Image (cartoon, helix red, strand yellow):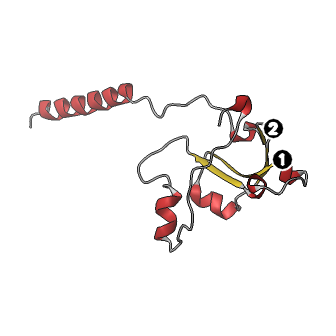
């Protein structure tokens, strides 16, 4: 029995494996700050309150990091004012995944919630004033 076809096949398999290992660099690690460093006070006009997700939800989502907050106008926090801005709350949720492989992360709530039977009553863009007069 000739052994050279088996030897050639093994050499080709090992060579292919070695080539794939040398070309594969894994997932990139991005330099980033954790969400806990995101300010709770914005533009000296909005005061945030940290909210937490339940552990059973975190176990399903498998997030690398997340932020869930509600921002209230400073005038509402201090008990002053009755205008439209004082009635406005800004809810903020940001989920972060270090790796985003197909099927391994979750999608936008605008896709997910209606599929679960929820209905959006209102969705709008709101200008939030920030430092320097911009928004």
**Residue closest to the eye, 9 or 96:** 96
Left or right: 16 as drawn, with respect to 75: left
Q: Position of residue 48 (x, y in %)?
A: 78, 48
Q: State the residue at coordinates (43%, 54%).
A: 103
Contact? badges 2 and 1 (CB < 8 Å):
yes
> Alpha carbon of mark 2 to alpha carbon of mark 1: how far?
7 Å
Left or right: 114 as drawn, with respect to 59: left
**Residue closest to the eye, 128 or 60:** 128
**Residue closest to the eye, 54 or 75:** 75
Q: Secondary structure at mark 2?
A: loop
Q: State the residue at coordinates (33%, 30%).
A: 20
Left or right: 96 as drawn, with respect to 131: left
Q: State the residue at coordinates (74%, 36%).
A: 37
Find residue 22 and report its image quarter. Answer: top left
Q: Position of residue 18 (x, y in %)?
A: 33, 27
Q: Position of residue 71 (x, y in %)?
A: 75, 50
Quadrant for the C terminus, please.
Answer: top right
Q: Which residue is mark 2?
A: 44
Q: Secondary structure at mark 1?
A: helix
Find residue 89 and report its image quarter. Answer: bottom right
Residue at the farthest bottom position: 117
Q: Which residue is mark 1?
A: 74
Left or right: 105 as drawn, with respect to 84: left
Q: State the residue at coordinates (69%, 37%).
A: 34
Residue at the farthest front position: 83
Which callout, 2 or 1, points at the residue further toward the start of the chain? 2
């Amino acid at each position: 029995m000739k052994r050279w076809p088996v030897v050639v096949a093994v050499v080709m398999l090992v060579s292919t494996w070695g080539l794939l290992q040398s070309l594969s660099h894994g997932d990139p690690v991005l330099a980033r700050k954790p969400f806990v460093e995101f300010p709770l006070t914005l533009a000296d006009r909005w005061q945030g309150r940290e909210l937490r997700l339940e552990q059973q939800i975190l176990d399903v989502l498998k997030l690398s990091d997340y932020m869930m907050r509600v921002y209230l106008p400073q005038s509402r926090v201090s008990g002053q004012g009755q205008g439209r801005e004082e009635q406005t709350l800004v809810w903020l949720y940001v989920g972060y995944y270090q790796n985003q492989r197909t099927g391994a992360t979750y999608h936008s709530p605008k896709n997910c919630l209606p599929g679960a039977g929820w209905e959006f009553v209102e969705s709008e863009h709101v200008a939030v004033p920030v430092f320097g007069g911009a928004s």
